[in-house]
Amino acid sequence: ILAEVVLRVAGRPIAAFVAEELSRPLELPDLELGLGPRAVESLAFSYWLGKDRLRVGGIDVAAGFEDRNNTASLFESMNPAVGLVTDAASLAAFYEFLVAGGVTHTRRRLISEPTLRRYVTRNHSGWERTGKAFCSVGRGFMVGARLPTIYGWWGTGGCFGHPGGFSSLAFGDRDTGIAAAIVTNGNRGFGDLARRFIPLAHGLREACL
């Protein structure tokens, strides 16, 4: 739906929109939606290492996980939710740009402050039935809360970001000014995601307080 909205409003496919409006101005050539000139074999393979069955939203995500998530068709679909191709450094740099308020390192503004604020601050909180956890969200990112979140055990109110699958996490923190991306390719499920990344994210933030 988002890809279609971008196409109709901007008159460009979403991959071109991301490249022209974000990646190029930010000088992040390795931040792309879709494969571009790459072969799918050049990407890190995504592995399922968890239980044989894991139901999310009524679907067993463990069954056929590797077949679904390592095909060219996945990236060629231009689905904004799963089609980003990048590395940890580029992803962290993108969040650094957001922490800076939508301004590039050359002081060029790409996103207005009022628009960005709607995406990185809380819009709604409640019990998220798919992940079976309390969750706070803005209009574009999962945001921190008083309760423990994926960004740490406490004090995450200034954080915004999102986990990728069950193996990666990227976020920015307005309180400490840091941006981080932790990218792995082993997937086990929600519990393992929390076990691995909450202590890492908390440690990164605590070191900057």
Image (tube, rainbow, N blue to C red):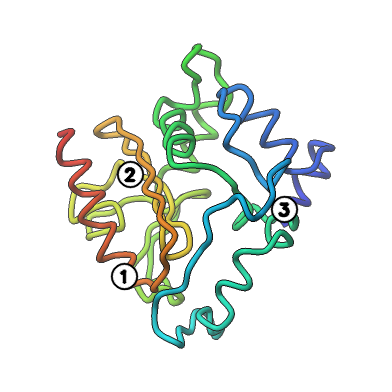
Q: Position of residue 177 (x, y in %)?
A: 29, 30
Q: Quadrant of residue 52?
A: bottom left
Report how far apart the C-alphas of labels 3 and 2 lie in the structure. Answer: 27 Å
CA gap, disc 3 and disc 1: 28 Å
**Which SS class for mark 2?**
strand
Give the Cα distance between marks 1 and 2: 21 Å
Dot 3 or dot 1, earlier in sequence: 3
Q: Position of residue 1 (x, y in %)?
A: 73, 57
Residue drawn at point x = 28 percent, y = 46 percent: 157
Vertical arrangement, residue 157 with respect to residue 24, above or below: below
Q: Earlier in the sequence, mark 3 or mark 2?
A: 3
Q: Quadrant of residue 50?
A: bottom left
Tell me the residue that label 2 is attached to: 159
Counting from the top left corner in percent of width and height, residue 80 is at 64, 52
Q: Which mark is residue 192?
A: 1
Question: In the image, 173: left or right of 49?
Answer: left
> Which label is found at residue 65?
none
Say what amino acid the circle numbered 2 marks: Cys
Callout 2: 10 Å neighbours few (<14), some, many (20+)? many
Q: Which residue is mark 3?
A: 78
Give, as a three-letter code, the residue at label 1.
Answer: Asp
Can you give x and y, in whole percent of width and height, for residue 152 in the image?
A: 23, 53
Tell me if mark 3 has few (under 14), some (14-19) or many (20+) residues whose alpha carbon lies within 10 angstroms of its own: some
Dot 1 falls on a residue whose secondary structure is helix
Say if 16 sits above or below 189 in the image.
Answer: above
